[in-house]
Amino acid sequence: MGSCQKFEPPNPEPWNSRTLRANLPRSPSARSLRCPSRVGVRTLEELVAYQLSIQFKSAVYSLVRKSPAADRDLRYRDQLFDAVLSVSANIAEGFGRRTTRDLCLFLSYARGSVAESIARVEDGVHRGHFTARAGDEALVLGRRTAAAIAGLQRSLRPFLGPSSGDH
């Protein structure tokens, strides 16, 4: 995979890239960010990993807002919201840094935030804030986001020097 643009996470339906782009907020700041020339996309919004992170964040926000218990548990809610917000924020920050090495570093941070968010959604089920079935959409999107980030990281490895580590 030499190009981020070509990466398609497994099972693209029902959240295919056309649907994702149609549902993304249109903000001048997101459109104005430009990717390092080696990545193969022009804007942040073109990255499937970013698109999925926005969908994941929306699903988590909706899940919590539909559960009075989760919405009232301020510490839980704030920690979950901080974690899920960090996913798209780290992708955007890495993209905005303008170097492939920095993008890879921030993708690693985003991957960690996805893992934390998934763990916190699962914790919400264990706490009784919502059922496993209610959390399924968010969990599926979280796993798809993690897979897209991992695929993007793999596609960038050829552009890093030999001392790139596991970014």
Image: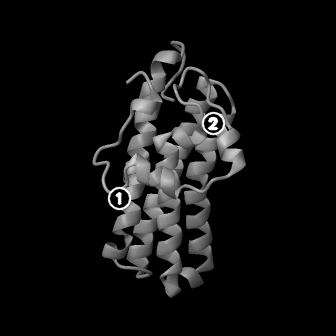
The residue under the point 51% across, 29% down is: 167
Secondary structure under the numbered disc 2 in the rendered image: helix
Query: In front: 17, or 84?
Result: 17
Task: Note whether 125 is above or below 59 in the view shown.
Answer: below
In 3D space, how far apart are the residues under numbered discs 1 and 2 (Cα atoms)? Answer: 24 Å
Q: Where is residue 43 in the image (x, y as percent from the top left)?
A: 60, 36
Please name the residue that numbered disc 2 is placed on. Answer: 94
Task: Note whether 37 is above or below 162 in the view shown.
Answer: below
Looking at the picture, which amino acid does disc 1 mark? Answer: Val
Secondary structure under the numbered disc 1 in the rendered image: helix
Query: In front: 109, or 30?
Result: 30
Query: In front: 27, or 113?
Result: 27
Residue 120, visible in the rendered structure: yes
The residue under the point 52% across, 46% down is: 50
Q: Quadrant of residue 98?
A: top right
Please name the residue that numbered disc 1 is placed on. Answer: 140
The residue under the point 42% across, 49% down is: 18
Q: Where is residue 80 in the image (x, y as percent from the top left)?
A: 55, 66
The residue under the point 55% across, 58% down is: 84
